[in-house]
Amino acid sequence: IYNSDTELLTPLGFCYYKIGKNKEALEVLKASFSLNSEQTEVEKLIAEIEKK
């Protein structure tokens, strides 16, 4: 579904999160994190969303 550009996926995931679309945010952020696991902010947000 998503391309392999973390510079697009990460901000998209944060936007989804900010507007309350947690399911979509989680999907996009996990895709981004799988491409670059050094994104600590993404990792933290994924954990936060999964707690809900």
Image (cartoon, grey):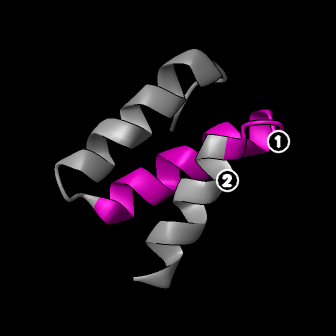
Residues 3 and 49: in front is: 49
In what element is the residue under mark 2? helix
Above or below for 9 versus 19: above
Dots 1, 2 in contact, CB < 8 A: yes
Residue tagged by mark 1?
A: 37
Q: Amino acid at mark 1?
A: Ser
**Marks 1/2: CA–CA distance:** 8 Å
User: Which range is magenta?
Assistant: 22-40
Mark found first going from the N terminus, 1 or 2:
1
In the rendered image, residue 49, in percent from the top left (x then y), is placed at 45, 69
- Kind of residue at disc 2: Glu
* Residue in view at x 24 percent, y 47 percent: 18
Can you tell which mark lies on residue 4? none
Give coordinates of residue 32: x percent, y percent.
Answer: 64, 37
Q: Is residue 24 placed above or below 40 in the rendered structure?
A: below
Identify the residue at the far left of this view: 19
* In front of the other: 31 or 18: 18
Which quarter shows the C terminus? bottom left
Q: Which residue is mark 2?
A: 43
